[in-house]
Amino acid sequence: MTEQSDIPIPIIDTAHCTGCELCIHICPTNALLMKDGVAVVGNPNACTYTGHCERICPELAISRPFQIIFSPKEDTS
């Protein structure tokens, strides 16, 4: 998650990103861009959290945080 937003966005480990741009090209909403030779989430509001970027990254530099929310048990009686 970002400091500016509560929406979930991918986390890019810049120490592992080699700048291959595969994630940039596969992102359907153009949420990612290159900055100083590494991928960054340049437009977090555009991210639809598809996970394409995470799956295509050969360096495993991209991860997506998840938050598990439990809902109250429904009364079925």
Image: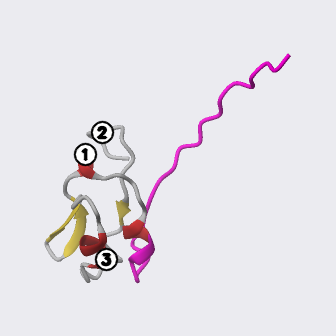
Dividing the picture into quadrants, the one containing residue 19 is: bottom left
Q: Residues within 10 Å of mark 2 (few under 14, many from 20)?
A: few
Task: Find the residue positioned furthest to the right.
Answer: 77
Question: Dot 1 corresponds to which residue?
Answer: 45
Secondary structure predominantly adopted by residues drawn in magenta = loop
Q: Residues within 10 Å of mark 3 (few under 14, many from 20)?
A: some
Mark 3 or 2, nearer chain start: 2
Q: Residue at x 30, y 42 (%)?
A: 3
- Pointer 1 and pointer 2: residues touching (CB < 8 Å)? yes
In the rendering, which numbered label is found on residue 5? 2
Question: Dot 3 corresponds to which residue?
Answer: 17
Secondary element at tag 1 = helix
Secondary element at tag 3 = loop
In the rendering, which numbered label is found on residue 37? none
Residue 51 position, x and y percent, is: 43, 63
Q: Amino acid at mark 1?
A: Asn
Q: Residue at x 32, y 46 (%)?
A: 2
Is 55 or 75 nearer to us in this picture?
75
Residue 30 position, x and y percent, is: 21, 61
In the rendered view, does 12 fall on the left or right side of 75?
A: left
Residue 57 position, x and y percent, is: 39, 77
Q: Amino acid at mark 2?
A: Ser
The magenta segment: 55-77
Mark 1 or 2, nearer chain start: 2
Task: Find the residue positioned furthest to the front.
Answer: 77
Mark 1 or 3, nearer chain start: 3
Q: Is residue 32 above or below residue 15?
A: above
Is residue 3 within the magenta segment?
no
Q: Is residue 60 above or below residue 47?
A: below
- Gap between marks 3 and 2, in whole Å? 23 Å
Q: Amino acid at mark 3?
A: Cys
Dividing the picture into quadrants, the one containing residue 37 is: bottom left
